[in-house]
């Protein structure tokens, strides 16, 4: 079955809302969503006990073609690290530490969505 752009966007929005709720329930403070600059986009910018966190959210309707986490390449990780530093510089945030997290959301046809939070990816 072919999915439309609107369906993919709706699935992505669902995943981001679920990721925000999950992160907040686990003590992170969401500072911004869908921040964009010339170098790219951060889905979520958050703070976790003084650590600045750039969070990539990957949402899928199944894991038939691999998990959402498998969709992130080493180049993407490197770009996310640069984006977190750029966000901190542009917002005059002096964080000694920062990290990149990934939240994987799989929304199956039946049952609740599954959320997996990978902390501090390299």
Image: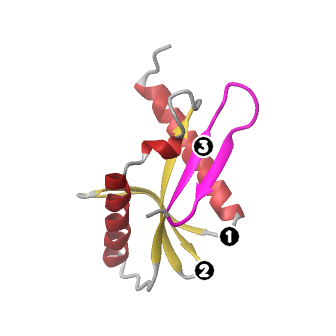
Up-down relation of residue 60 to residue 118 (above or below): above
Q: Residue at x 44, y 42 (%)?
A: 71
Q: Count the labels in the image.
A: 3
User: What distance separates the C-alpha of mark 3 from that of mark 1?
Assistant: 19 Å
Give the vertical position of 67 relative to 42 (above or below): above
- Look at the numbered disc 2 and give the secondary structure of its residue: loop
| Residues rendered magenta in the picture | 101-120
Q: Which residue is mark 3?
A: 105
Mark linked to residue 27: 1
Whole-number angstrom distance, CA of label 1 to CA of label 2: 8 Å
| Residue 16 locus on image (x, y percent) | 55, 48
Q: Nearer the viewer, mark 3 or mark 1?
A: 3
Query: Residue 92: x and y, percent?
Result: 36, 82
Circle 1 — which element? loop
Say which element carries label 3.
Answer: strand
User: Which residue is rendered at x = 54% and y = 73% of the image?
Assistant: 47
Residue 26 placement, left or right of 80: right
Q: Earlier in the sequence, mark 2 or mark 3?
A: 2
Circle nearer the N terminus (1, 2): 1
Residue of label 2: 49
Residue plotted at (47% across, 70% down): 99
- In the rendered image, the quadrant that contains the C terminus is bottom left
Q: Residue at x 46, y 81 (%)?
A: 97
Q: Earlier in the sequence, mark 3 or mark 1?
A: 1
From the viewer's perspective, is 61 left or right of 8?
Answer: right
Instruction: Please determine whether, in this image, residue 4 is positioned above or below residue 30.
Output: above
| Left or right of residue 104, residue 83 in this image | left
**Disc 1 + disc 2, Cβ < 8 Å:** yes
Magenta-drawn stretch contains 107: yes
């Amino acid at each position: 079955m072919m999915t439309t752009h609107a369906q993919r966007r709706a699935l992505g929005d669902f995943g981001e809302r679920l990721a925000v709720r999950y992160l907040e329930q686990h003590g992170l403070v969401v500072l911004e969503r869908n921040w964009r600059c010339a170098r790219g986009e951060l889905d979520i910018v958050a703070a976790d006990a003084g650590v600045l966190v750039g969070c990539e959210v990957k949402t899928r309707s199944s894991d038939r073609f691999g998990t959402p986490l498998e969709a992130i390449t080493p180049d993407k990780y490197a770009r996310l690290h640069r984006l977190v530093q750029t966000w901190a510089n542009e917002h005059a945030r002096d964080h000694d530490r920062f990290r990149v997290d990934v939240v994987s959301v799989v929304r199956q046809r039946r049952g609740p969505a599954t959320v997996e939070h990978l902390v501090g990816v390299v």
